[in-house]
Amino acid sequence: MPKTFDNYPISSTFLGFDYSQNKIGIAVGQRLTSTASSLTTLVSHNKKINWDGIEQLVKQWNPIAFIVGLPLTMDGDEQETTETAKIFGKQLHKRYNLPIHFMDERLTSREASHLLGYDGLTSPRRHSKPGKKVKKKKQYGHDIDQLAAQLILQSWLNEH
């Protein structure tokens, strides 16, 4: 299986993931156009990955590799969630026997929320007054997750 971008056929399709234990943002990208598009966000129940949803996307898009966002600190060091993203990548590889590429995902959620008009906040609850409940729009987090996956995949395509 090819290990470098240049060895992938020009018609290659990739799936990108913004992984967390609660939800997974997913995007699709093509080598031919070097562009990525957001697809969906899959919600995990009791921290169990929605493999059926991923399976449907793999069948629909027939990717040649997966790009998984790697959460790092601002200094580039690994953090607690870095290992869970690596485990998710290994699980993808084991299930589909496709190459996994990890991409630094620092600030993608913040950039996604900014692009969606949420003033760079990843959560509307962050700046609420103590004791005051803030209603989240139903799509708020889902939009950010799939757009973050698109940004991760687009960054990887741009680098290669």
Image (cartoon, rainbow, N blue to C red):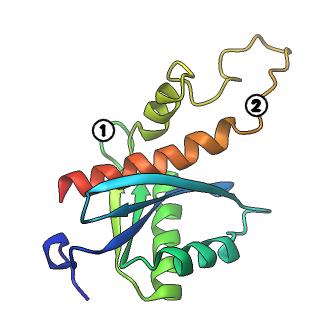
Most extreme residue toward the top is 129
Three-letter residue code for mark 1:
Asp
Residue at x-position 41% and y-position 76%? 63
In the rendering, which numbered label is found on residue 28?
none
Q: Position of residue 72 (x, y in %)?
A: 39, 47
Q: How many marks?
A: 2
Front in this rendered view, residue 33 or 56: 33
Q: Position of residue 148 (x, y in %)?
A: 48, 45
Q: Position of residue 32 (x, y in %)?
A: 24, 65
Residue at x-position 38% and y-position 51%? 152
Q: Secondary structure at mark 2?
A: loop
Residue at x-position 52% and y-position 70%? 88
Q: Quadrant of residue 140?
A: top right
In the rendering, which numbered label is found on residue 137?
2
Compared across the picture, whether 73 is left or right of 44 comes to left
Q: Position of residue 138 (x, y in %)?
A: 77, 37
In the rendering, which numbered label is found on residue 75?
1
Three-letter residue code for mark 2:
Lys
